[in-house]
């Protein structure tokens, strides 16, 4: 299932600065299904408030959104170690406050380059 990437400025414009800050602090780096109607049981409502979630539902209801992690420079070596330990992408994203998308990119780099080679051999 594809997801829609939402930038931090876009989230602030939609939800307001305060709710967006709370959502990113608690949920940043993860992806969520946005229901068509807001409800208090959803993490976006718990941390951003029901009115802010209503705006997200109007804009992205029925879609899956990816939230930015809210910080730059994630520790790639730790992501690799957690992948090697068998942690899921979602677990790593939540634990390290990075996006699931970032974890998938690191994982794809591992499988595409299993011996750590920096360049492919031509012959």
Image: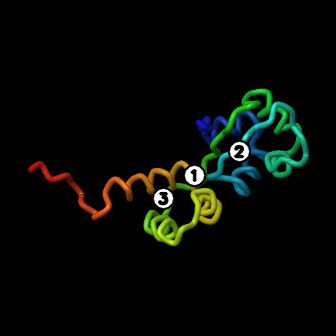
**Which of pointers 1 and 2 lies earlier in the amino acid sequence?**
2
Q: Is residue 104 left or right of residue 120?
A: right
Dot 3 alpha-carbon crowd within 10 angstroms: few under 14, some 14 to 19, many 20 or more: few
Residue located 79% across and 32% down the image:
57
Q: CA distance from mark 3 to mark 1?
A: 15 Å
Query: Circle 1 sits on which residue?
Result: 100
Q: Which mark is residue 91?
A: none
Quarter occupied by the N terminus: top right
Of label 3 and label 1, which has the lower sequence position? 3
Question: Which residue corresponds to mark 3?
Answer: 73
Task: State the residue position of label 2.
Answer: 32
The percent coordinates of residue 106 (x first, y second) are 44, 56
Quarter assignment of residue 9:
top right
Q: Label 1 neighbourhood size at 10 Å, few (<14), some (14-19), many (20+)?
A: many
Question: Left or right of 33: which side holds 41?
Answer: right
What distance separates the C-alpha of mark 2 from that of mark 3? 23 Å
Query: Quarter of the image holding residue 20?
Result: top right
Work out whether residue 26 or residue 37 is closer to the camera in this orientation and state it: 37
Q: Which mark lies nearer to you, 2 or 3?
A: 2
Q: Residue furthest top?
A: 58
Task: Give the SS element for disc 1.
Answer: helix
Q: Residues within 10 Å of mark 2 (few under 14, many from 20)?
A: some
Q: Secondary structure at mark 2?
A: strand
Tell me the distance, in whole angstroms, between the alpha carbons under discs 1 and 2. 11 Å
Q: Are marks 2 and 3 in contact (CB under 8 Å)?
A: no
The residue under the point 84% across, 34% down is: 54
Label 2 vs 3, first from the N-terminus: 2
Residue shown at 73% from the left, 57% from the top: 26
Q: Is residue 89 left or right of residue 107?
A: right
User: Is the Cβ of the residue at disc 3 closer than 8 Å to that at disc 1?
Assistant: no
Horizontal and vertical percent for residue 37? 86, 33
């Amino acid at each position: 299932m594809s997801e829609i990437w939402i930038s931090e400025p876009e989230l602030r414009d939609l939800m307001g600065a305060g709710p967006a800050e709370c959502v990113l602090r608690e949920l940043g780096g993860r992806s969520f299904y946005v229901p068509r109607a807001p409800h208090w049981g959803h993490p976006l409502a718990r941390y951003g408030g029901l009115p802010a979630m209503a705006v997200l539902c109007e804009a992205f209801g029925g879609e899956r959104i990816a939230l930015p992690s809210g910080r730059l420079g994630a520790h790639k070596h730790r992501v690799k170690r957690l992948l090697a330990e068998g942690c899921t992408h979602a677990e790593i994203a939540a634990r390290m406050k990075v996006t699931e998308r970032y974890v998938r990119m690191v994982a794809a780099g591992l499988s595409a380059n299993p011996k750590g080679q920096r360049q492919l051999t031509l012959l």
